[in-house]
Amino acid sequence: MQRRTIVARIHTSGIAPANPELFFHLQELALYGLEATLIPVLSFEFLSLPSFSEKLSHPECYGGLIFTSPRAVEAVELCLKKDNKTEVWEKSLKEKWNAKSVYVVGNATASLGESPAFPLLFPCGNLKREILPKMLKDKGIQMESITVYQTIPHPGIQVNLDSYYSKQGVPASITFFSPSGLTYSLKHIQELSGDSIDQIKFAAIGPTTAHALTAKGLPVSCTAESPTPQALAAGIRKALQPQGCC
């Protein structure tokens, strides 16, 4: 049985080192006997950093910060380095921001209670969903968003996929981690796979990506029970078994 799989994953071209999560995904798949190949499908460009830097210089105007992605955190680090604000940050800004609330996406954000006196600063990407802003608005919580990065197709998608197919052939499965990653790579995958695309087991890291696959007319053979390397690897292995499904 063919055991080769593609992991169509985000490639972060920022200042942070390679995401260790990627290593854990590939390592976990290998434990299940899967020969996984990472194909970067997304990259990021940072935007409006001077404006964001100016906002970071005035913590007195905000009730706190909201982070929903690692890229937003990278944007803060870039602002500090780009504008030589490291010294100012250490002397005063860091203490002032630390005195305020910092929220991350998930249960902590959902449990926001009383509205702060000042708006929460929300650095985000161009593809942000409106669920969080609407939820905060419904709770009467002020929020000021600023787009600090945009998602773009990775420039090497076609070359990398061409190279994979020419050497490895049609993969047994392809895993997507985001709807945008699917959008940017699907055309190339369809062209390279041809009629053999029906043989591929498509996997999704979560329900949002699974819905995007279905919307494109692709059968979802596996949706990870949780967004972890272990759950994904177990799901793909099950999907690749004869008569298997997730």
Image (cartoon, rainbow, N blue to C red):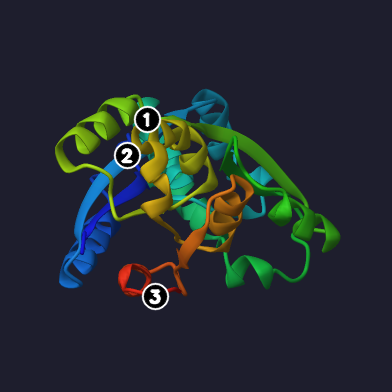
Residue 182 drawn at (x, y percent): 48, 42
Image quarter of residue 124: top right
**In the depicted structure, whether residue 13 falls above or below residue 120:** above
- How many discs mark residues in the rendered view? 3
Task: Look at label 1 and name its amino acid.
Answer: His
Quadrant including the N terminus? bottom left
Relative to residue 60, is residue 185 drawn left or right?
left
The residue beneath circle 1 is: 154
Relative to residue 30, is residue 229 drawn left or right?
right
Relative to residue 88, is residue 141 drawn left or right?
right
How far, Cα to Cα, is label 2 from label 1?
Answer: 6 Å
Other-residue count near label 1 (Cα within 10 Å), few / some / many at <14 / 14–19 / ≥20:
many
Task: Name the mark on residue 40.
Answer: 2
**In the depicted structure, whether residue 121 falls above or below residue 98:** above
The residue beneath circle 3 is: 243
Task: Look at label 3 and name its amino acid.
Answer: Gln
Q: Earlier in the sequence, mark 1 or mark 3?
A: 1
Q: Are marks 2 and 1 in contact (CB under 8 Å)?
A: yes
How far, Cα to Cα, is label 2 from label 3?
Answer: 30 Å
Relative to residue 73, is residue 183 drawn left or right?
right
Task: Look at label 2 and name its amino acid.
Answer: Pro
How far, Cα to Cα, is label 1 from label 3?
Answer: 35 Å
Q: Nearer the viewer, mark 1 or mark 3?
A: 3
Image quarter of residue 5: bottom left
